[in-house]
Image (cartoon, grey):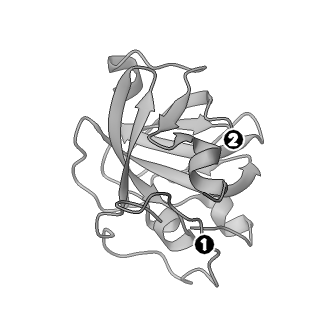
Amino acid sequence: MRLVALLMAAAVCGGCNDSPTPTVEPIQSLTPSLPTVAQPKLQTMKLWLGAEQMEAELALNGIEQQTGMMFRTNLAEQAGMLFVFPMTHRAGFWMKNCPLPLSAAYIDPDGVILEIHDLEPYNTNSVNAATDRVQYVLETSRGWFGRHNVSTGAVVRTEHGGLTETFFQKR
């Protein structure tokens, strides 16, 4: 899955697993063509959405975000992918080369879920946010939010605190 807004924006940033805090690093340029295979599993981090816990891969730079869940054929129930952007924007996600039915939560800088959208496999129509305050997007298996009673207004946290503290403040 590739973020359409990523291609329109010139700047996107990007790291964590065993390190105390992930770092977002600027990228030099995007690959001129679309990925043709699934990317290897990315670094992961535990997230809490209310009382629910999940292990999310971290898409922290342009290439990781552009590739996203493309070509992946399975996703564990308690797994997801968190896209971390350097600034707020009006997110727009599509499902190019993505066979999995997914749900995506559009999240503000404070970690509050603003919108939840279901995404159709292989659909190349962008699902755009209603607001330009999206800084994070969390993709899960389709219906995960409903199955786990997580709705708009819920706050996403990490073991380091809020999303801004985790990804953008020096420790």
State which quadrant residue 14 falls in: bottom right
The answer to which of marks 2 and 1 sits earlier in the sequence is: 1
Q: Residue furthest right?
A: 132
Q: Residues within 10 Å of mark 2 (few under 14, many from 20)?
A: some
Residue 99 image position (x, y, % from top left): 30, 52
Give the CA distance from mark 2 to mark 1. 18 Å
The amino acid type of the residue labelled 1 equals Glu
In the depicted structure, whether residue 136 falls above or below residue 85: above
Look at the image and tell me in which quarter the N terminus lies. bottom left
In the depicted structure, whether residue 19 falls above or below residue 79: below
Residue 161 image position (x, y, % from top left): 54, 38
State which quadrant residue 72 falls in: bottom left
Q: Nearer the viewer, residue 152 or 73?
A: 152
Residue beneath the point at 65% across and 75% down: 26
Q: Nearer the viewer, residue 155 or 35?
A: 155
Residue beneath the point at 63% across and 83% down: 29
Look at the image and tell me in which quarter the C terminus lies. bottom right
Residue 75 image position (x, y, % from top left): 25, 46
Task: Report which residue position mark 1 lands on.
Answer: 25
Which type of secondary structure does the marked residue at label 2 adopt? loop
What mark, if any, has residue 109 been given in the picture?
2
What mark, if any, has residue 144 been given in the picture?
none
Q: Residue furthest top?
A: 149
State which quadrant residue 5 falls in: bottom right
Q: Residues within 10 Å of mark 1 (few under 14, many from 20)?
A: some
Instruction: Specify whether 118 is left or right of 84.
Output: left
Look at the numbered discs 2 and 1 and tell me whether their residues touch, using CB distance below 8 Å.
Answer: no
Q: Nearer the viewer, residue 55 or 8?
A: 55
Residue 8 image position (x, y, % from top left): 73, 66
The amino acid type of the residue labelled 2 equals Pro
In the depicted structure, whether residue 136 falls above or below residue 78: below
